[in-house]
Amino acid sequence: MKYIDEYRDEQIVRALADRIARRVTRSWSLMEICGGQTHTIMRYGLDELLPETVRLVHGPGCPVCVTPLEVVDKAIAIASTPDVTFASYGDMLRVPGSRSDLFRVKAAGGDVRIVYSPMEALKLARALPQRRVVFFAIGFETTAPPNAMAVWEARRLGLTNFSMLVSHVLVPPALHLLMNSPDTQVQGLIAPGHVCTVVGYRPYEELCRDHGVPVVVGGFEPADLMEAVLMLVAQLEEGRCAVENQYSRSVSREGNLPAQRIVEQVFEVCDRKWRGIGGIPRSGLALRPEFADYDAERVFPVAGVTAEEPPECISALVLQGLKRPTDCPVFGARCTPENPMGAPMVSAEGACAAYYRYRRIAC
Amino acid sequence: MCLAVPGKILEAEERDGNRIAKVQFGGITRETLLNFVPEAQVGDYVIVHVGFAISRVDEEEARKTYEALESLGLLEGEPGADL
């Protein structure tokens, strides 16, 4: 497939690894922010191709992982309502809530459907006028425009049986928090290529300036990530600090303006809780008041739902890059993708799932 | 969640106020909304996320990136090549 195969060329990936090894004179810790990038790194063993002095730290870019437990509990409460058809991306179904998960709701007779796009949820609402269709709208900046579009269309079509449980998050506020932490070891950032496709890399210039941290916007194929590492290492070795764009075939400085416009029309910035990390000011998106009729938290009586996170799971530290999945005492033993204790073991973007799937580690 | 993949626009039409395309990914095709990439035309590659094209692949940038990578791979393949 064009624009995929050529970036998986082994010779190119190995050549980049050699070049990185020759460029490095000391130790560097780099964070790839997006969970999709974490999976590419693990799947192709890119970290093992790098010299020991270049360490990759995995970032918080897994929306399933950072969706707070209480929002999962709200989803379960809504999905258990008899006249509700609950539509969600597949990953969210196995994420454990406090006492249950969406799969168990489905097994118990709840109408829980896996959808690939928010527009499929909208189609369900049109096809099932007697049901209340609720879409679980999670994600980062990449997913916000499609979800905004679904709400926009629902209003245009005059649908009264469609709403969204919104738990949208924004990447830069979390990165400011991580970079301000006295514990952080991160010296360079690989910015998330698809988030930047939508919002552009301009927001990362502030991050670079404020924290003196070099940033390279990276793609998702092995050669993309190795080139991003090489670009970061070159900046660090030369004492430079700038935002550079490796993923220029999709990312511009300004991003996708039509996509940004629909997000501004439908959503507004709000304070948001991140699972494992806690509340981060102005780190999320919520529906604007004029779209309140489409806000599932207003349509359904779930305002009082709160939850405490299980103490055993160290996902908070994993999501902040402070611990590796294999540092967790329950990793691979009592916590597996089949029986997850924390969301990073569930999601296709979670660091724990990536380690479990691609690393042969005796447990 | 931010998974997005490149695909080729095979055909596009206006339907119900939206611009909808048939996009090919390897052996399969999927219906994709082009609302965010009004400039995209049949034959273009777009990056698709949850049923929406979020960018048109910039062929010129892709070519530059790939040529740089390819030349690196070829040069590194030669023993003693000094970069």
Image (cartoon, coloured by chain):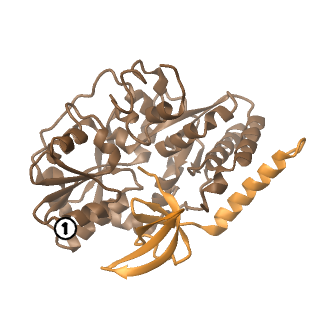
Compare residues A241 and A163 and report the one nearer the observer. Answer: A163
Compare residues A178 and B50 and report the one nearer the observer. Answer: B50
Please say if A32 is above or below A3.
above
- For the question of whether residue A180 can be seen, the reply is no
Instruction: Name the residue type under label 1.
Output: Ala
Q: Quadrant of residue A214?
A: top right
Q: Chain of mark 1?
A: A
Please say if B12 is above or below B49.
below
Report the residue marked by disc 1: A127
Which shade of the palette goes to chain B?
Answer: orange
Residue at (63, 55) in percent of width and height: A5
**What chain is colored brown?**
A
Compare residues A177 and A135 and report the one nearer the observer. Answer: A135
Q: Is residue A320 left or right of residue A234?
A: left
Please say if B29 is above or below A213.
below
Count of picture labels: 1
Q: Quadrant of residue A352?
A: top left
Q: Is residue A58 left or right of residue A169?
A: right
Q: Position of residue A127 (x, y in %)?
A: 19, 67
Q: Position of residue A119 (x, y in %)?
A: 30, 64
Q: Position of residue A87 (x, y in %)?
A: 25, 53
Mark 1 surroundings within 10 Å by alpha-carbon count, few (fewer than 14), some (14 through 19), many (20 or more)? few
